[in-house]
Image: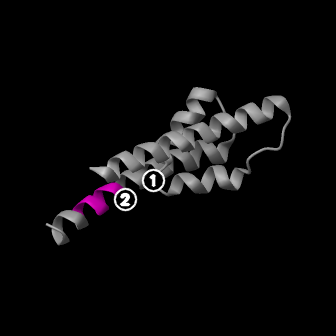
């Protein structure tokens, strides 16, 4: 139960991070590095990153983001199924 809430909050934070970087870009402020924008979604934040990309139209033209972020979403889904399976097998 609480794990799902934590993942949801994490995805909202990742989405907000993409929005912040877009705002920084418009104001010519210091940006969030692409490495951070690509690595943080690996930790179950892929859907938030994808939603942030689409919502803020940010990094959508960069090929590495167009490939890696959807791949991270798929990886996150697989990881969630594996975690769910392990919890059901070993903790129930």
3D distance between C-alphas at marks 2 and 1: 8 Å
Q: Quick check: 26 above or below 86?
A: above
Task: Tell me the residue that label 1 is attached to.
Answer: 44
Q: Tell me if 31 is positioned left or right of 15 in this view.
A: right
| Residue closest to the far right | 28
Query: Which of marks 1 and 2 precedes in the sequence?
Result: 1
Is the C-beta separation of discs 2 and 1 under 8 Å? yes
Secondary structure at badge 2 equals: helix
* Residue shown at the point (37%, 59%) measured from the top left: 79
User: In terms of image quadrants, where is residue 21?
Assistant: top right
Q: Position of residue 65 (x, y in %)?
A: 63, 45
Magenta region: 80-85
Q: Is residue 70 magenta?
A: no
Q: Quick check: 50 above or below 7?
A: above
Q: Tell me if 5 is positioned left or right of 59 in this view.
A: left
Q: Position of residue 34 (x, y in %)?
A: 71, 50
Q: Of the numbered discs in the image, which one, if any, rests on residue 8?
A: none
Nearest the eye: 17 or 52: 17
Q: Is residue 49 visible?
A: no
Q: Position of residue 28 (x, y in %)?
A: 86, 34
Task: Tell me the residue that label 2 is attached to.
Answer: 79
């Amino acid at each position: 139960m609480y794990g799902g809430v934590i993942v949801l909050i994490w995805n909202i934070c990742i989405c907000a991070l993409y929005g912040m970087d877009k705002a920084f870009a418009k104001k010519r402020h210091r940006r969030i590095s692409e490495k951070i924008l690509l690595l943080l979604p690996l930790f179950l934040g892929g859907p938030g990153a994808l939603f942030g990309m689409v919502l803020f139209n940010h990094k959508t033209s960069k090929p590495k983001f167009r490939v890696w972020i959807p791949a991270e979403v798929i990886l996150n889904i697989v990881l969630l199924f594996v975690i769910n399976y392990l919890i059901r097998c070993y903790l129930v």
